[in-house]
Every structure is written in C-alpha cells, then in structure tokens.
Amino acid sequence: MSETESTTSPETKASPWWQRIPLTLQILIALVAAVSVGIALGAGNPNPSNATLINNLAIPAELVLKALRALATPLILVAVLHTLMTTNIPGTAGRRLAVLLLTNTTVAILVGLFVANVLRPGTWGNVATSTTTQITTQSLDPWGILKDAVPEAVLKPLVDNNVIQLIVIALSFGIVLRGLKSEQIAQGKKGYQPIEDVIGILFEAVVRVLNWVIALVPFAVFGIVAKTVAMQGFTPFKSLGAFILAVLLALALQACYYLTRVKFGSWVPPLKFLAGGSDAFLTAFSTSSSAAAMPVTFEVLQTKVGLRESSAALGALVGANFNNDGTALYEAMSALYISQLIGQHLTLGQQLIVILTSIFASVGAANIPNAGLVTMTLVFTSVGLPTQYIALLVTIDWFLDRCRTAINVMGDMTVSALLDGKKPRSVDEA
C-alpha cells in the first residue's frame, strides 16, 4: 500500500474531537458545569417553579443505570464462559492459584467492610430521599443461601439479576464446555471451535455496548450532580469525601497485606517488588484497565522482579482474568456506605451476602475500565439496596477506579511472587 493510500484509509481517519477528549477530563468538565448549574438553580434552596427542570436533570443518570443493570448479567455470564474456555490452567498450579485468588479476594472484602464499619463514612452526611426505602431484614442463614444458589430455571438469574445463581450457571456450563474442549483436543478434533468463537464474539459485543454506555457517563454525572446541588446544596458530598478517604485507606491496608504475603511467602524483597512493579502500577492507574496493564505486568515480573516465566504467566495472565481484589473491596464498601447514607444499615447476615456476592461478581468482572460499576448493581440488588444511589458514586468512580485497578495489578503480582516460592530462579533458569 502506498503512503497516500495509507493516510486516507478508514483505519487512520481522525476521530471526532469529542472522542479524543479523555473520559476523565470529560467527567471533570461535567462536574464543573453541574456545580455551576446547581448553584444557579438554588444550591439547596431551589425555586419551586424550577422543580420539573431539576428533576429532569437526573434522567440521563437513570438511563445509564438502567443500561448498566441490563448489561450486568450478560457481561458476567459471557466473561466467565469466555475465561474458562480460553484460559490454560495447569492442574496442581491451577489449584494453588485458585486458593490464592480466593484468599486474597476474601481478605480484600473483609478489609473493606472493616474500614467501612469503623469509619462509617455514610454517616458523615445525609441524603434527603423522596421515598422511604426499607431493606428486608435477613438473618444469617447459610442453608438458605445455599438453597438460593440453585436457580429454579436456567434463564431466571438473568431476569432477577441474581449474581450467585448466575455464577453457578456460568461455572457449570463453563466447566462442562472446557471438559468437552479438552476431549476434542485429545481426539484431534476442533468441534469446540465454533462454540468458543460464538462466546468470544458475544463477549466482545457486550463489551462494546458497555463502552457505549460508559461514553454517556459524563452526561449522567452532570445530571445527578446538578440535581443534587440544586436540591440539597453540597451537604451530600461531604460524606463522599469521607468515602474516598475510607476507600483509599482500605486499599492501602490491602497493599500492606500483599507486601506481608510477599515478604513471608516468597523470596522477593518487598522493596524490590514495589520498585520492579512501578511501571505496571502506573500503567494500571493511568489506563484504569488491568487488561491494558497485563503485558507490562508480565514483562516487569520477569525482567525487574526476577520471577520465573511460568509464575509470571500464571499470576499476570491467568490470574488477572479472575483476580479483582480492589474491585471486590470497593463494591463491598459501596454497599455499606450507601446503606449508612440512607439510614438502612446492613445486618451481619446481609454483610455476609455482600461478601459472597462481591466475590462472585469480581470473578465475572471483565478487565476493562468501569466494569465495577456494572457488577455493583448486582451487589446492591442482592441485599435490596436501591441502585439509583450508584449515580452518586459515579461522580467519584473515575478516580477510585484507577486506584483499585492498581491494587488489582498488585494482587496479580503478589500471586505470581507466591507461586514462585522462596527460592529465586537460578542462572540456568534465567
């Protein structure tokens, strides 16, 4: 192809100017504009004649949340199926990998709930609600949770947004399809390939639709912030500041847990671990995508940290498809924060349901920006929390998403270091 042809091809055609503005900058612009509009409309003391206009400002946020709820179940279903069909997981190492991932995710959720229960950021401000929302009180019933994990019909979890039942179905079909694929490979056949291709196409389609919805997030931020400032002033945002500090503290504690595990469970010195992984952390923070940081993580684990290729691959490439510790921590804290904000505090039984749902939701969360917003709708639904309050979290998610993605990558690196053991690789292995 000539140079002239290449410069005029569709692939190299410049995108519209608004698509070249980073999403983070779009959200910041929306925040500034929303605060200005909210102040102009009354800043907590609105004119009754503007009531209809103020209420209509929240329509974009409501539409975005409806779209996120609609995408949540198919995203988790196809993500789990796609991961199980395409990921190569060795036997013994795979079992150890699963234990490490489950342990790290559980600890992350417990850390998040501990910080949220101690600091109680939702009580630092209040939100006036137009309707009274009551959460059904639930006692701690492990057998009830186990019985509820089995759906009455295959498609029912997709309608009810029941994440535990959805994961049971996804894992069941995923394991069976993976087994059939192994049998076909052993027989030299490729009958599984059309199914794998269909699942891959469905996964890509859901992700693309999700990207369309995420592109509308700045409009949702503008609407919900403008309405909130106009109706209630800046009081509700005081607790959001407290929530940001609480999440950052919880993520820092999770990072300390990782470094402790690395110090006592591997040969890698914690300082070398941090210095060697700095490029991966910065990539994760700047892109807010574990998938984008994956090749960087895999590279630095070998070249700068000094791990074996097999260990680096298991943690950074395989584990990254299942490990979303930062996301699970954030979703659990968000549920507790909103329950505190609206004065409907979660019981011990409900917090256990949050733990289980967050674990399963994090397994199905794709390694793409803002996927946590999608799965958060399922966590809220599991304990009866109103999902419309997620719109408030959208205003700060652009920042916290980057922070928790960096923790996700640190979790991947920790798993790799632990799998590498307590003996560094020899010269022959290098």
Image (spheres, grey):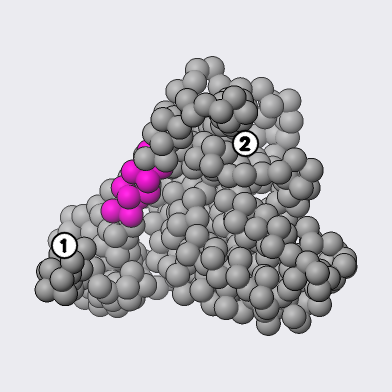
Side of 403 relative to 219 (left or right): right
Whether residue 356 is visible to the viewer of this picture, yes or no, is yes
Residue 245 in picture, x, y percent from top left: 59, 73
Q: Residue at x 71, y 75 (%)?
A: 305
Q: Earlier in the sequence, mark 2 or mark 1?
A: 1
Using the image as rendered, state which of residue 248 and residue 350 is in the foreground: 248
Q: For residue 113, say whether it is visible.
A: no
> What residue type is disc 2 on?
Thr
Secondary structure beneath disc 1? Answer: helix
What's the magenta region? 202-212
Q: Nearer the viewer, residue 404 or 233?
A: 404
- Residue 207 tag number: none
Q: Is residue 213 above or below residue 187?
A: below
Residue linked to disc 2:
137
**Disc 1 marks which amino acid?**
Pro
Q: Is 83 rendered above or below residue 323?
A: above
Q: Please state if 200 lies on the left or on the right of 41 as rendered.
A: right
Residue shown at 73% from the left, 49% from the top: 97
Percent from the top left, x then y, of residue 95?
76, 43
Q: Which residue is mark 1?
A: 10
| Location of residue 294 in the rendering, given as x and y in whole percent from the top left corner | 54, 63
Q: Observer-nearest residue: 253 or 22?
A: 22
| SS at badge 2 | loop
**With respect to residue 82, does 7 lie above or below?**
below
